[in-house]
Amino acid sequence: MPATSRGVVVACVALWAAVVGLLVAFPEPLWWAARALPLYVAGRFPKQRELDLVGRGTQLLRDAKTRERGVALIEQAIAIDPYTHRFQLAEAYRISGRTNEALAQYHRTLEVDPLTVEAYERISSMLARLGRTREAEAALDRGIAALEAAAPRYRAVQDPSVALAYNVKAVEAERRLVEGALELRSLRDDLRRRRERAQREGLPFTSSPR
């Protein structure tokens, strides 16, 4: 087989393996994207309505009197796009005092994007307030592991054929992941110190630093 043909075969096999890997890792988001793509192309996907619902819902969350209405609007946006605004829905539930629902939506957020630093922070903070400090630390550990594992994938490529713009974006993405991991590590270490100190002193754990 000529070298060119072998190269084409290898490229096709690699592409197929990548597609299969994505389908195995992210079946729900990819299935939803496949269904939504024709609507986007046809200009019939209600993206602007979805964004309007989230924007109006977020504003209504600021006032206790309109908070439930705000939650309802963001839930409507999720019905349109079940992936993009999971974090906003979790925030809405948290602000409304719906702790269990908020925790569930933060976890759904991480199923869609396991590199969402704020979701790990929120889960840990809420669990700590509930006195579930070991689980709070474990949540931060999972975030640290996910970010540190992902960071090397975004390192700049030492190849003159690679566009400079790609390397600039890669360096920026890696920097954000590294900083996120450091932030979660700092929160984890602080939480652990306060838990251990409370145990030594025979005092109840407080979720906020003293």
Image: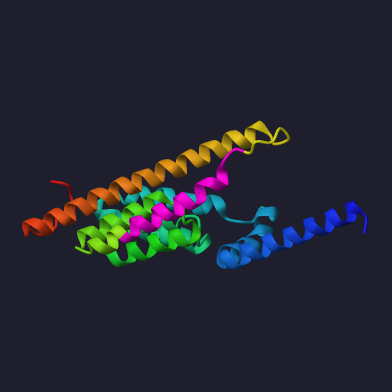
Task: Kindly give the residue lying farthest to the right in the view shown.
Answer: 2
State the image quarter where residue 99 is shown. bottom left
Asked if residue 116 lies left or right of residue 17, the reply is left
- Can residue 68 be seen? no
Task: Kindly give the residue lying farthest to the left in the view shown.
Answer: 202
Q: Assess whether residue 150 is covered by the magenta stretch.
A: yes
Where is 164 relative to 152, above or below? above
Residue at the image point whose x is 29% and y is 57% from the top: 124
Asked if residue 28 lies left or right of residue 73, the reply is right
Query: Number of numbered discs present?
Result: 0
**Residue closest to the eye, 111 or 20:** 20
In the rendered image, residue 206, in percent from the top left (x then y), is placed at 14, 55
**Residue closest to the eye, 83 or 192:** 192
In the rendered image, residue 96, in percent from the top left (x then y), is placed at 27, 58
**Residue closest to the eye, 28 or 124:** 124
Decide whether the magenta segment is chiefly helix, strand or loop.
helix
Where is 154 relative to 136, above or below? above
Asked if residue 124 lies left or right of residue 80, the reply is left
In the rendered image, residue 126, in percent from the top left (x then y), is placed at 26, 58
Asked if residue 4 lies left or right of residue 125, the reply is right
Residue at the image point whose x is 51% and y is 50% from the top: 150
Report the span colored magenta.
Answer: 138-156
In the rendered image, residue 200, in percent from the top left (x then y), is placed at 10, 57
Q: Assess whether residue 43 is covered by the magenta stretch.
A: no
Of the 4 image quadrants, the one containing the N terminus is bottom right
Residue at the image point whose x is 27% and y is 49% from the top: 189
- Can residue 16 be seen? yes
Residue at the image point whose x is 57% and y is 55% from the top: 46
Q: What colouring does the structure picture have?
A: rainbow
Where is 22 relative to 164, above or below? below
